[in-house]
Amino acid sequence: MKLFKLRGKLTGKQQWILAILGLAFILVLWIILTMGANPIVSPRALPKPLRVFTAFGELFSDNNLVRNGFFSIGLNLAGYIEAILISVPIGFIIGLFPLFKGMFQSQVDAIRYIPLTALIGIFIVWFGTQTSMKYHFLAFGIIIYMLPVIVQRIREVNDVYLKTVYTLGATDWQTIKTVYFPAVMSRFMDDIRVLTAISWTYIIVIEGVGSEGGLGDLIYRVGQRQARIDKVFAILLLIIVIGMLTDRIFVALDKVFFPHKYQADESEKYSKLKEESYLEIIGDFAVTILVWVAIALYLIAFINEFTGIISAESRLFAYLFKDAAWAIHLVAFAIIGYKGYALYKRFASKKSDKPKPAADE
């Protein structure tokens, strides 16, 4: 059977069916372990599924789940952006130039063994207990794994590409721009997806400091103080959902910025010519409309954030993300810039394709 073939590929339909079956298996096993008056596993250790799902209502009404969730997302995003902005240039400098590689390679390898939880006190001394300390801590926790990965990706660049550009007479800067940077960043996107889980691991630890809120702080309050294990499981399920959605976003961005990685799959998928269905056309149009509507709503909220022309009291980003709101704005303006540039290129190409009027003889 193809399902048991080594490294065999599943069709899209098979992936959906098997994913649903796997989820159903886990849910059934969970029900079996917790069913009855005397369940196999004590409710104090593993609550019943229904109890966990009903706990979401209490978290919304009593524990401000929405605000805490958005704060954790903003904090996570801020730490990730800071880590990338620091790791990428330093990683390229160490990976490309022997001088810096000899000076700092051993230190980069050594910092991976630092127990991060032991550094919380040091970060409190350096930055206090506010939001900035928390995303600096998250950034450091990501950097110690991200830096060695970038250096390793530089080593893995295929020599064929390097020999080709050297044959064409490329300078060092041209080699970095046309070979090293695209090759490293295309594979680095896969590493980012893996490292996302690390940031969620440490966010649970650091949010307990200062009690500013967040899902980590909420787990501490409902778990240790209230002994509500059902609420803890509900928050953990929410973190899993957020992580899965984040992973899908990274996959979508990877397809946009590095489409060559998916050319083989796309060519196999569309090897047989077929007309685009009306549903696909409507779906693409709906997604485009939703993106521009979201951009418009963001701009309205952004203007109100600094002017208060709509409501001086309801400043959405400060309420949800606090001091980590800058990361949301940075990502939002990057998206707006990209969509605007794509729209400009589209209209420019249409304008250039128009036939020019014949010159009068």
Image (cartoon, grey):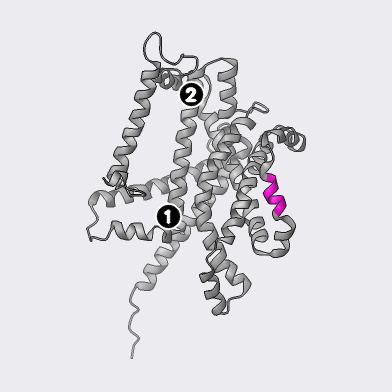
Quadrant of residue 53 within the rendered picture:
top left
Residue 252 percent coordinates (x, y)? 43, 50
What amino acid type should be assigned to the residue bearing mark 1?
Lys
Question: The C terminus is located in which quarter?
Answer: bottom left
Along the line of sight, which residue is nearer the eye, 9 or 349? 9
Q: Main secondary structure of the magenta part?
A: helix
Q: Residue at x 51, y 52 (%)?
A: 189
**Is residue 137 visible from the viewing direction of this image?**
yes
* Labels in figure, total: 2
Q: Which residues are magenta?
A: 106-111
Going from N to C along the chain, the mark reached first, 1 or 2, is 2
Q: In the image, which disc is placed on residue 192?
A: none
Determine the residue positioned at 58% across, 28% down. 216
Numbered disc 1: secondary structure: helix
Q: For the residues labelled 1 and 2, say whether their Cβ atoms are less than 8 Å apart.
A: no
- Residue 310, given in percent of the width and then of the height, sits at 52, 37
Q: Is residue 190 left or right of residue 141?
A: left
Does 19 sit left or right of 146 as displayed?
left
The CA span between labels 1 and 2 is: 33 Å
Residue name at image x 45 percent, y 39 percent: 244
Which residue is found at the position 64% from the left and 41% from the top? 141
* Identity of the residue furthest to the top in this view: 37
Please say whether residue 361 is one of the residues in the magenta stretch: no
Residue designated by label 1: 255
Instruction: Give the amino acid type for the residue marked by disc 2 in the picture.
Output: Phe
Instruction: Tell me the residue that label 2 is attached to.
Output: 233
- Percent of width and height locating residue 138: 63, 40
Task: Specify few, some or many for label 2: CA neighbours under 10 Å numbering under 14, 14-19, or 20 or more.
Answer: many
Q: Farthest residue to the right: give it.
A: 125
Residue 89 in percent (x, y) is at: 64, 57
